[in-house]
Amino acid sequence: MKPAPFDYQAPGTLREAIDLLASNPEAFVIAGGQSLMPLLAFRLATPSLLVDLRRLSGLGNIAVGDDGFRLGALVRWRDIEDDQRLVTAHPLLHAAVAHVAHYQIRNRGTVGGSLAHADPAAELPGVAVTCEGEITLFGPAGSRTVRAGDFFTGPLSTLRQPDEIVTELHLPKWPSGRRWAFRKYGRREGDFALAGILLFYDEDQRGALSNAHVGVIGACPRPHRLTRAEALLNGRGIDESLIRQAAVTAAEEVDPPDDLHADAAYRRGLVATLIERGLRAAAQQGSA
Amino acid sequence: MRVSFRINGDPVAVDVEPRLHLADCLREVLSLTGTHLGCEHGACGACTVIVDGAAVRACLMLTVQAEGASVVTVEGLSSDGALNPLQTAFRKHHALQCGFCTPGMLTTAHALLTEEPDADADRIRSALSGNLCRCTGYIPIVDAVLEARAAYQKADKP
């Protein structure tokens, strides 16, 4: 339960951090450390060097503007929870982050850490993928931006190269009045999701759905959208029959893991139930 | 590596390996054994301390990351051997039996009530949901924290 020995550096600039990573192939990046510290304790990760981002400036901002939302890599969960603008400006993000682990973890865990760690059950990667977010990485050749839908390639696997650092998540604008839902099931509060769903859609004046986005976490090797369920919803009016059809379609569309926490069939059932509850809640928003 | 920070108000400098987590530093280097270690991988909450005003798990933070920080442990919650209002409420409500989880419960609740002295029972349960207790069934703990709110609400007033 004690990490293997490693060296430690806390560089003052992003460039120095990249140089350290580039010259130490066995180096890891640490920010809040809320996912990395357990990996170190179990010696599942044995880096030669930890490059701590805590002294870097300019990565801790939440910007809400005409081009959407920009979250710096060092933004902590509690910064998002405490940002009252986001309650109305991006309710899906705000609600999802409130479900990240526990109070103490949310005081240290970061946006960049969660994206780079890429746990399939994590909330923020689900938000990023469902909302068609973009992730900016900085490396020896400068910065590049990757679509969140492409960034996550499998459990704990991303397109990030070892000498790159996630610097920012961009989420597109969120129109007011958009209907949305976040639902997650774990056995205890703060547990990793056995399954979770994120969804939103817009509606025209006749009640026809458009722009339906449905994403899944936990019941999948990586967060992804459920395009068949989305296609089913678009152009139709929301009612109980559509909600049930969408739930069945979503459950068919996921490919859940079978592990000691839950078998695949159970997770599939969870996805159906969570989609059903989420769509029902979204349909009732603002009409209470 | 040499690391300087404040512990319960006093400046301290320690010389530690980078891999030493903050909880081990508190217990083994600074002999502050009030902070307990249960799981050492961020699941039990027993090692919760307050860093720059925020409750964090001391097993999920390296000592070297505490450079320049202000750290408060359970030893820093009271002075002169007297119980503070939160501790008094824990005693009154039998909010502890074996006591192993208690330092983490106290530091978490102290950080919460300092920031949110009006926290309701749901908020308290949510904040304490990352702290495991195997004895009490949690109800007396929530009752104690609810009662202690009065002291924090008063302290808030100028």
Image (cartoon, rainbow, N blue to C red):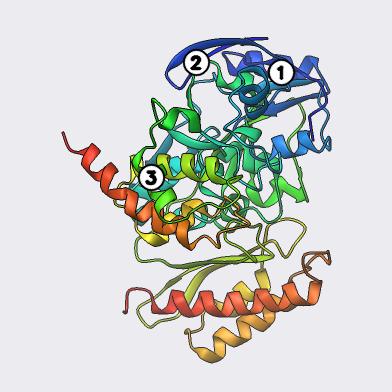
Residue B18: give its label. Answer: 1
CA separation, marks 2 and 3?
Answer: 32 Å
Residue B88: give its label. Answer: 3
CB of mark 3 within 8 Å of CB of mark 1? no
* SS label for mark 2: loop
CA separation, marks 3 and 1?
Answer: 38 Å
Q: Earlier in the sequence, mark 2 or mark 1?
A: 1
The quarter of the picture where residue A188 lies is bottom right
Q: Is residue A168 above or below residue A5?
A: below
Q: Earlier in the sequence, mark 3 or mark 1?
A: 1
For label 2, the crowd category at 10 Å Cα-Cα, with few meaning under 14, some 14 to 19 and many 20 or more, is some
- Residues A28 and A286: in front is A28
- Residues A100 and B149: in front is B149
* SS label for mark 3: helix
Q: Is residue A202 above or below residue B91?
A: below
Question: Badge 1 sits on which subunit?
Answer: B
CA separation, marks 2 and 1?
Answer: 16 Å
Pick the quarter of the image with the N terminus of chain A.
top right
Question: Badge 2 sits on which subunit?
Answer: B
| Kind of residue sitting beneath label 1 | Pro
Name the residue rendered at 77%, 38% in the picture.
Answer: A39
